[in-house]
Amino acid sequence: MSKERVILGIDPGTNIMGWGIIKIKSSTPTFISMGIIDLRKDTDPYNKLSKIYKEIRNLVEAYSPDEIALESPFCGKNIQSMHKLGRAQGAAIAASLTNDAQVFEYAPRKIKLSITGKGSASKEQVAAIVSNILSVKSLPVKLDATDGLAVALCHYLSSCSVINSNYSGSSNGSKRSKSSWSKFLENNPERIK
């Protein structure tokens, strides 16, 4: 995949939605932008969905991403929260489709694993590694923004040809082989710090 492409990563939320944009050029990810959609002040759930749709659509129009990656909702104990999160994700997906971009989903554990090597990593660990990989100068106040970057970076790493040979990039639980990571690191020594 040597073609230049832009990836928008979205970390859905009903109070704060994080997003991050990276560009892939010559197989190297570069930081473009990141931010949050702050929904905490709005108590009407339908206004929140409208704001999510409008904000994501504005990002799609401004950056014309080729691919959009979202964190998929995880199954928690609170069904009502899961339902609300699913609606927020749906609004983001609908807005994403306005530009004919391809949409991909990744499980939270898979994102953390691809970035840190640990599926139970903290937001702070993810933020530190993403910032290091993408040379982000300073961390945002809300780490939901770096979570959005992590989703975009996870999608890029999942689509790399070295990794992709043993790993589909879908969130179906398929496993990477250790040899593909070893080969990836061998072919990309600048990634080791």
Image (tube, rainbow, N blue to C red):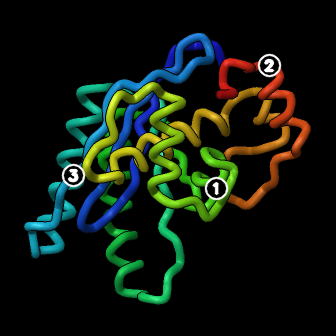
Closer to the eye: label 1 or 2: 2
Q: Residue furthest front?
A: 193
Residue 37 tag number: 3
Q: Where residue 17 appears, x then y in whole percent?
A: 30, 56
Which residue is disc 2 drawn over? 187
Does 58 appear above or below 14? above
Q: Quadrant of residue 120?
A: bottom right
Does 38 appear above or below 103? below
Q: Where residue 38 appears, x then y in whole percent?
A: 18, 56
Ranked by sequence position, the earlier of labels 1 and 2 is 1
Front residue of this view, candidates 193 and 42? 193
Q: Where residue 2 appears, x then y in whole percent?
A: 63, 13
Q: Residues within 10 Å of mark 1 (few under 14, many from 20)?
A: many
Q: CA distance from mark 1 to mark 2?
A: 22 Å
Residue at point 41% right, 34% down? 100
Q: Residues within 10 Å of mark 3 (few under 14, many from 20)?
A: many
Q: CA distance from mark 1 to mark 3?
A: 23 Å
Residue at point 50% right, 38% down? 130
